[in-house]
Amino acid sequence: MTTVLRRLDEIAGTLASRPDVVGLLGLGSCGTQRGRVDEHSDLDFFVVVDEGAKWRYLDRTDWLEAAGPITYRFDHDRNGRKALYADGVFVEYLVFTAAELRTVPFSGARVVWRRDDAPKDLAESGRSIPREPFHTEEFHLNNALTSLYVGLHRELRGERLAASRLIQGSAVDDVIALSRLDGGDFPYRDPFDPARRVERAFRLPLAAMVPGYDGNVPAARFTLDWLSKRYALPAGIGDAIRELIRSADV
């Protein structure tokens, strides 16, 4: 058993002795996808508590420190905290009542421990994860092209960081989506972050698509060429992007 999974079991042992705790859910690689746990995995979990008990698990860390000393803690959400154990295990946790949990979209949760009277469907969200509005080739191709177009205008204006987020961020997310459509979904895909594990799923020339802060124009040129070799680009937007690239090269 890896350190993070062992730590989660230790936390569960402490919480199981608390009468105001309903259950503990593991998420991510500590949830139902334990096959992807490695030495770089952090520990994500939900603590489910009775009404009126949230403050004890948000404001106090005695239950967390029962498994080992904490060297760092950060309040990152009104319902959650991040913390670092002295041995390097990084944890991110949220605290909900059972009623609140029903309103939270999540997937892949695993019951690590639950009280006898806990809801049987504790690990099932009452809300589905928001779906992509248009997961089609037409949508992702045109979304990538318009991100390149707007991003190049921001580059020419001198807004290099904003440009990079469109050219090397949004457009690349659509390239990944197009690759999913062409090659199918892949194991352990993160529904909240398209960049997770993409290197293992597709052979994309990411170094050329994401060269860094000073590389917006070559990134746009490369991504446009990559798209044009695989898809029929609408002439109006394709030609406009090429003209912007020529302007940026002057």
Image (cartoon, helix red, strand yellow):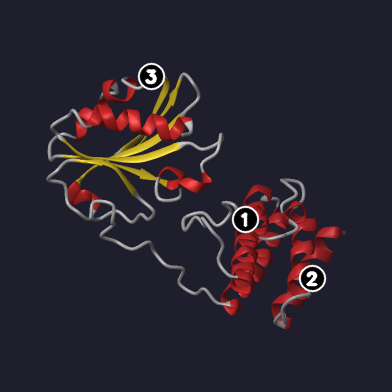
Depth check, front residue: 246 or 144: 144
Q: Position of residue 147 (x, y in %)?
A: 63, 65
The residue at which mark 3 appears reads as 68
Residue at the extreme right: 250
Depth check, front residue: 162 or 101: 101
Q: Which mark is residue 242?
A: 2
Q: Nearer the viewer, mark 2 or mark 3?
A: 3
Q: Nearer the viewer, mark 1 or mark 2?
A: 1
In the rendered view, tell whether residue 246 sits above or below residue 218: below
* Residue at (76% x, 75% y) in the render: 228
Q: Position of residue 24 (x, y in %)?
A: 28, 40
The picture quadrant where one finds residue 105 is: bottom left
Q: Nearer the viewer, mark 1 or mark 3?
A: 3
* Residue at (76% x, 46% y) in the render: 214
For residue 75, say whether it is visible.
Answer: no
C-alpha gap between disc 1 and disc 3: 34 Å
Mark 1 touching mark 2, by CB under 8 A?
no
C-alpha gap between disc 2 and disc 3: 57 Å
The residue at which mark 1 appears reads as 198
Q: Position of residue 219 (x, y in %)?
A: 76, 57
Amino acid, disc 3: Gly
Q: Secondary structure at mark 3?
A: loop
Q: Which mark is residue 25?
A: none
Say which label, 1 or 2, has the lower sequence index: 1
Amino acid, disc 1: Val
Q: Residues within 10 Å of mark 1 (few under 14, many from 20)?
A: some
Q: Position of residue 227 (x, y in %)?
A: 73, 71
Say which label, 2 or 3, has the lower sequence index: 3
The image quadrant where one finds the C terminus is bottom right
